[in-house]
């Protein structure tokens, strides 16, 4: 089993190593997401009017609730979630996009020591992997928040 964050070997049954758990989720044991990609696009549609994250790839904001679940939110989002895109323009290797983005970010951070937002893979409710990144403009006291 590999850590969904840094890709280092970890014990079976875990999703993240202690360091990634601390960096990403303030040490909390976060459950896999409770929605799948179909649901993601429904939520995305409902939120699109209110969202201010730029870029073309579909994404939504998430926050960590009191039950250690990541839930969609349109304000005070701490994370950005990007699933594998829908196949609308015959893109090749579509299913690799999420893992490629994650790997690129890990190489930047681990090999080239570039300061990147904490990022990882996370499972949707059907087990498909999505890319999650912690907003670097988020802070617990709210002083640097832009959303
Ligand atoms: Zn890790």
Image (spheres, rainbow, N blue to C red):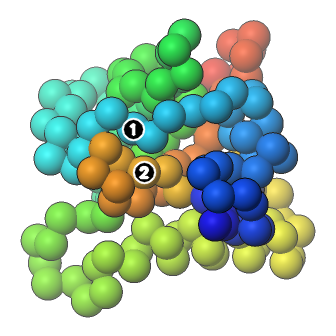
Viewer-proximal residue, 97 or 136? 97
47 versus 33 height, above or below: above
Please indicate whether residue 101 sits to the left or right of residue 110 in the image. Answer: left
Q: Position of residue 80 (x, y in %)?
A: 48, 42
Q: Which mark is residue 123?
A: 2
Quadrant for ligand 1 reads: bottom right
SS label for mark 1: loop
Examine the image and state in which quarter residue 88 appears.
bottom left
Q: Earlier in the sequence, mark 2 or mark 1?
A: 1
Examine the image and state in which quarter residue 91 appears.
bottom left
Viewer-proximal residue, 146 or 20? 20
Q: Position of residue 15 (x, y in %)?
A: 61, 50
Q: Quadrant of the N terminus?
A: bottom right
Question: Label 1: which residue?
Answer: 33
85 versus 96 height, above or below: above
Do labels 2 and 1 touch, CB within 8 Å? yes
Please indicate whether residue 88 sits to the left or right of residue 68 in the image. Answer: left
> Residue at coordinates 61% horizontally, 74% vertically from top-left?
103
> Residue at coordinates 64% horizontally, 49% vertically from top-left?
14
Q: Residue furthest bottom?
A: 92
Give the total of numbered labels: 2
69 versus 31 height, above or below: above
């Amino acid at each position: 089993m590999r850590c969904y964050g840094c890709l280092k070997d970890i014990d079976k049954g875990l999703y993240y190593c202690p360091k990634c758990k601390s960096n990403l989720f303030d040490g909390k044991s976060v459950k896999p997401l409770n929605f799948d990609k179909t649901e993601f696009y429904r939520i995305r549609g409902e939120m699109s009017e209110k969202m201010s994250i730029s870029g073309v790839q579909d994404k939504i904001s998430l926050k960590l609730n009191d039950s250690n679940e990541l839930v969609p939110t349109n304000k005070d989002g701490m994370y950005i979630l990007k699933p594998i895109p829908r196949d609308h323009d015959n893109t090749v290797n579509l299913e690799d996009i999420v893992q490629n983005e994650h790997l690129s970010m890990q190489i930047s951070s681990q090999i080239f020591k570039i300061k990147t937002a904490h990022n990882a893979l996370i499972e949707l409710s059907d087990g498909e992997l999505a890319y999650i990144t912690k907003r670097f403009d988020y802070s617990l006291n709210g002083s640097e928040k832009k959303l």
